[in-house]
Image (cartoon, rainbow, N blue to C red):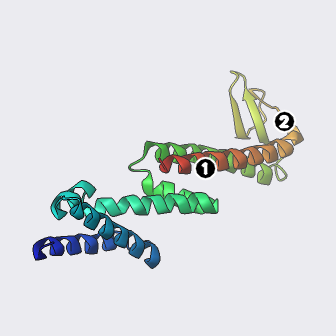
Amino acid sequence: MDEKAYAELKAYLRRLGWALATLPVRDRDDIVEETREHVLARVEQGLSVRETLAALGQAETYGRRFVDEMEVSGALAGQRSLASLALLLRRAHRSAAAALTLLVLLVLSILALMAIAALVTKPFDPEHVGLWITSRGGLYVGTGDGSSVRRELLGNWIYPAAVLDLAAVWVLGRRILLWGTRRQAR
């Protein structure tokens, strides 16, 4: 390999190392070394350094794939909700699955907040807080004025209903979060 090709490989590997800066040093060094060995093996097969590096793509893009893979693997292996949520937030602008997951989680969070609000406020104003049905058949959770246009449906059963709602939101939210994280692995 001539000096110009060696300098081109060295510059590529340096940029790759920079692209992998968020990874642990050992992982970063392993990826850079494996890439160097791959390029040298392709050169021994008769390809030029330039052709081999062109096939790999830009160092930053090539490195980003490794970083993405490590992020997803870490989130899935740890089964930590915050790590998965952070991963999805970082990818929402470039992944429809991540954006959809976040949207569904937002809706579930609103449902959970409504249940918590009902649990907290019902003891202080039991006559006006609950699950209401309007004369037109609409349902809503919140406060009512006690008029004949609305009728409260659950009474004190709102407590177990709210707890069940919170449990369902928790289980469903975890499953959706896991689904969205797994979709990022593809």
The image position of residue 13, as x and y in percent, is 27, 72
Can you say which quadrant of the picture contains the N terminus? bottom left
Q: CA distance from mark 1 to mark 2?
A: 33 Å
Q: Residue 117, percent across and down?
A: 73, 51
Front residue of 162/38: it is 38
Label 2 crowd bin: few (<14), some (14–19), many (20+), radius 10 Å: few
Query: Which residue is found at the position 30% from the left and 59% from the top?
Result: 61
User: Viewer-proximal residue, 37 or 144?
Assistant: 37
How many labels, in total? 2
Helix, strand or loop at disc 1?
helix
Residue 146 visible to an observer of this rendering? yes
Label 2 sits on residue: 154
Q: Is residue 66 above or below residue 176?
A: below
Q: Is residue 24 visible?
A: no
In the image, taking residue 82 as reference, residue 153 lies left or right, namely: right
Say which residue appears at 49% left-offset and 51% top-offset: 185
Q: In the rendered structure, which amino acid carries the disc numbered 2?
A: Leu
Left or right of 105 on screen, residue 130: right
- Judging depth in this view, the residue of 127 and 79 nearest the camera is 79
Q: Of tags 1 and 2, which is closer to the observer?
A: 1
Helix or strand or loop: what does disc 2 sit on? loop
Among numbered discs 1 and 2, the one appearing first in the sequence: 2
Q: Which residue is tagged 1?
A: 178
**Do callouts 1 and 2 mark residues in contact (Cβ within 8 Å)?**
no
- Please tell me whether residue 149 is drawn above or below residue 17 in the rendered image: above
Residue 39 position within the rendered picture, expressed as x and y whole percent measured from the top left = 27, 64
Picture residue at 32% right of the left edge, 73% below the top:
18
In the image as oriented, which residue stretches furthest toward the front? 45
For image coordinates 34% across by 63% down, the residue present is 63
Mark 1 residue crowding within 10 angstroms, few (<14) / some (14–19) / many (20+) = many
Query: What's the residue type where badge 1 is placed?
Result: Leu
